[in-house]
Amino acid sequence: MATTTQAAPAAQTDLTDGFHVLVETLLKNHFERMYGVIGIPVTDVARIAQAKGIRYLGLRHESDAGNAAAAEGFITGKPGLYLTVSAPGFLNGIVPLKEATENGWPVIMMSGSSSRELIDLGEGDYEGMDQLNYAKPFAKAAYRVDKVEDIPLVVARAIRAACSGRPGGVYIDLPGDTLGQTIAKDAAEALLYEVNDPAPAQIPAQGIIDQAMEVLASAKKPLIYLGKGAAYAQCDEAVKQFVESTGAPYLAMSMAKGLLPDNHPQNAASARGMTMRNADVVVLLGARLNWMLNFGKGKAWNENVRFIQVDIDPTEIDNSRYIAAPVVGDLKSTVGMFNEYLAKKPYKADPAWLESIQADSAKNNARFGGAETATTVPMTHYNALGAIKKVTDANPDVYITNEGANALDDCRDIIDMYLPRHRLDCGTWGVMGVGLPYAIGAAATTGKPVISIHGDSAFGFDGMEVETICRYQLPITVVVLNNGGVYRGDFKNLGDDGDPSPLTLSALGHYEKLMEAFGGTGYYATTPEEVEKYVAAGVASGKPTMVCVELSIHSGKESGHITYLNPQPVTGPLVGNEQEDLAEHRENGKLVD
Ligand code: ADP
């Protein structure tokens, strides 16, 4: 009989497993937090992460976990991390992965999954699904790790894919049996490494910098447009220097607000329309010419406008129109090169251009400002937000998260931001369900106070996270602006079945009781003074707080500022007066009787 010599099996104490290798890899790459919803087969990823010093924040829905992680990605420039269970949890987690990719924010989603062979043979496993292939269209990159030895590599690839170039969402598929695989501890230790320079500088050629600055030099009425890509790039001083040295007016997209303080004399926000219609050269710093900027064409813009576009993604250039100076590079390097060029060959906009904008701004502020300070009740969005503005002006380092239709638009217009990356909202897709998770991500990442401002409809998408806020005792003040409906609360059922209209919600609901149910403080506000007092108290307390703000059901308009995107029905159930009534609603915000 032949005899074989086998190595003695490694003692259990010399072995480690996929769970531990994953957590050690995350630690090696300085992940400090993980958001998630646990269950089969990833519960022990969270438990071990927590045991090893990664803060685990368990949310109430995978979409919220993903959005909290995405907020961290935007604020820090490093990928946020979240964990989901297989199939249904995975699918819930895909929505924020796609949203982060649309926003250009770095995030890594890790999802447990079934054994390969069960999926590939379609044997019908518990929550079995071919997740990797479902993830691919929604992610910037997607990987599956089948061998424990490959875990450090897959994490490295995910980090690099998430934050290099235009950042985005990356998916890692974690089959349960990979997590359970064992490996000798010293072999695992030898595999760990920290990713070297995950978001390398992308330095544009000097020739295109010169070309861009020559276009700028020819401008009579320049405009600088700051987008969330500029905020993300974390080169705040260089951007400020560029804006101030040119003397050009600037406009900030919603999440670029605060990159320069909103009360900066060059801010053209109060004369946005007039500035866009007249500018002859526009410098786009990390802002896409997508729907939010009317695709860079049409009546919103001067018909002879020329664009200088700075973007890290070459495929963004000429997206919707001709670009006179396409500068492909990372913003930090690029704006630094602009500043060097201007130090040698200064350009200064004609002061009369900025003065005309400031005059228009003063006129508009005088015309509309009164609504913010009105004492009328029931309140409108304007005077409720005007009251909150008093608190944010007194606490300029507060983070604002914001979602809704009118609650979004009016908050963006009324509440000034003073610091970069302090405002997070519905973003490129205009989605709901982000306000509370962004608040959780911002509070967990920075420890700073957050005011999370929601319309009553938007709050319904993520409201259960109030429990999470209380469980982790996060310094978040939630504000629900309740006008009793989607857009507003006075729509009527156009049929005769007696149900509420499709847009109607509970006008006199006490949302603050949700906060009280989990041990936080709740307030109900019916006047601007109460709004200010209660929001200030929430911020000062640093504790979970909620203010339910009773608005008039007539406050707000359908679809907020983007009513024009609604197609108008010409046939179907809306006929005769009903159709006219609907049109009247949309245009004048009047009641249907
Ligand atoms: P906004 O909605 O504020 O207009 P967008 O999300 O539309 O902003 O545009 C942001 C742009 O910034 C994207 O096209 C993205 O590729 C770009 N971007 C992101 N990070 C950087 C960076 N570090 N340098 C240059 N461009 C960047």
Image (cartoon, rainbow, N blue to C red):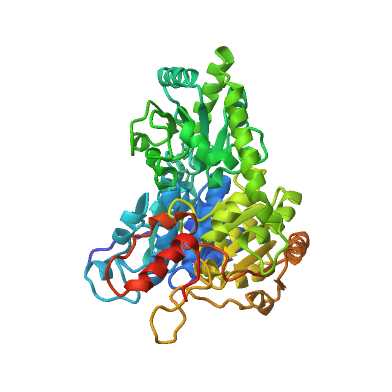
In the image, residue 514 above or below residue 210: below
Report the label total: 0
Q: Quadrant of the N terminus?
A: bottom left
Residue 86, position as x, y percentages in the image: 39, 69
- Whether residue 484 is visible to the viewer of this picture, yes or no, is yes
Q: Residue at x 45, y 17 (%)?
A: 214
- Vertical arrangement, residue 44 with respect to residue 397, above or below: below
Q: Residue at x 23, y 72 (%)?
A: 122
The front one of 567 and 520 is 567
Given residues 182 and 532, the one toward you in this image is 532
Residue furthest out toward the top: 344
Furthest residue in direction front, as rendered: 577
Q: Residue at x 44, y 22 (%)?
A: 212
Front-most of residues 544 and 56: 544
Q: Residue 213, position in %: x, y?
A: 47, 20
What residue is shown at x 61% (from left), y 78% (from top)?
A: 509
